[in-house]
Image (cartoon, rainbow, N blue to C red):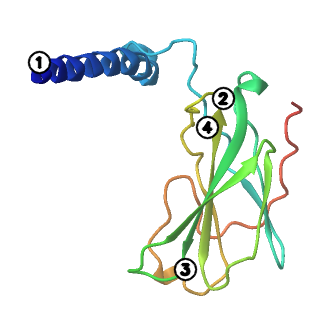
């Protein structure tokens, strides 16, 4: 009798879990696969523009089109490549809701690349794809390093940050 109660209890727990997990799984699917169509995909921000300083690098970007309240924050991916054959150091930083970010200290003897993505609202926030990357190099190692990824130039001249769109 106790083994049949245990079996019924296990079946009941499995049923409850399957019922409570289905809505989460459906909401996580893209709209084309039965997901929540009311959650629009976030577009990536523009590639960041850089202002190089002696102690910090200032980044600025334009927010993607769409409702301003759809984005709650931005994340900045920093890739620091010091030498060939060694995996780059990857740092992810939160930039808050602003479309500007200061990265300090400035790494010396490296190529540094920046990419930005938008983060949306929700219990499990949507994240856009990363923007194209913008890189700079403050070393003579550039000829020894592999080419950087899509959308970058090996050593851009410093650019003035864009004026962010008003909220």
Disc nearer the start of the sequence (3/1): 1
Disc nearer the start of the sequence (3/4): 4
Q: Residue at x 76, y 25 (%)?
A: 69
Task: Say if 143 sits above or below 58 in the image.
Answer: below
Could you give the CA–CA distance between mark 3 and mark 1, rounded to whole angstroms? 71 Å
x then y, percent, for residue 26 = 40, 17
- Numbered label tally: 4
Q: Residue at x 58, y 49 (%)?
A: 132
Tags 3 and 2 touching, CB below 8 Å: no
Q: Which residue is mark 4?
A: 44
Which numbered dot is residue 140?
none
Q: Quadrant of the N terminus?
A: top left
Frontmost residue, 38 versus 3: 3
User: Mark 3: few, some, or many residues within 10 Å (few <14, many ≥20)?
Assistant: many
Disc nearer the start of the sequence (4/1): 1
Frontmost residue, 31 versus 43: 31
Q: Which residue is mark 3?
A: 142
Q: Taking 140 as reference, is 30 left or right?
A: left
- Per the image, label 2 sits on a secondary structure element best described as loop
User: Mark 4: few, some, or many residues within 10 Å (few <14, many ≥20)?
Assistant: many
Could you give the CA–CA distance between mark 3 and mark 2, rounded to whole angstroms? 40 Å
x then y, percent, for residue 17 = 33, 22
Could you give the CA–CA distance between mark 3 and mark 4, rounded to whole angstroms? 28 Å
- Per the image, label 4 sits on a secondary structure element best described as loop
Disc nearer the start of the sequence (2/1): 1
Q: Which residue is mark 2?
A: 121
Which numbered dot is residue 4?
1
């Amino acid at each position: 009798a106790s083994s049949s109660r245990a079996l019924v209890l296990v079946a009941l727990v499995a049923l409850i879990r399957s019922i409570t997990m289905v809505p989460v799984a459906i909401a996580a699917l893209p709209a084309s696969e039965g997901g929540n169509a009311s959650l629009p995909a976030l577009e990536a921000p523009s590639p960041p523009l850089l202002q190089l300083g002696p102690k910090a690098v200032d980044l600025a970007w334009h927010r993607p089109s769409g409702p301003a309240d759809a984005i709650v924050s931005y994340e900045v991916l920093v890739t620091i490549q010091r030498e060939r054959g060694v995996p780059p150091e990857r740092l992810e930083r939160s930039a808050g809701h602003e479309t500007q970010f200061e990265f300090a200290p400035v790494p010396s003897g490296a190529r540094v690349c920046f990419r930005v993505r938008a983060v949306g609202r929700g219990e499990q926030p949507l994240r856009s794809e990363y923007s194209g990357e913008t890189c700079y190099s403050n070393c003579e190692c550039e000829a020894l390093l592999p080419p950087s990824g899509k959308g970058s130039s090996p050593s851009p001249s410093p650019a003035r940050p864009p004026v962010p769109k008003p909220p």
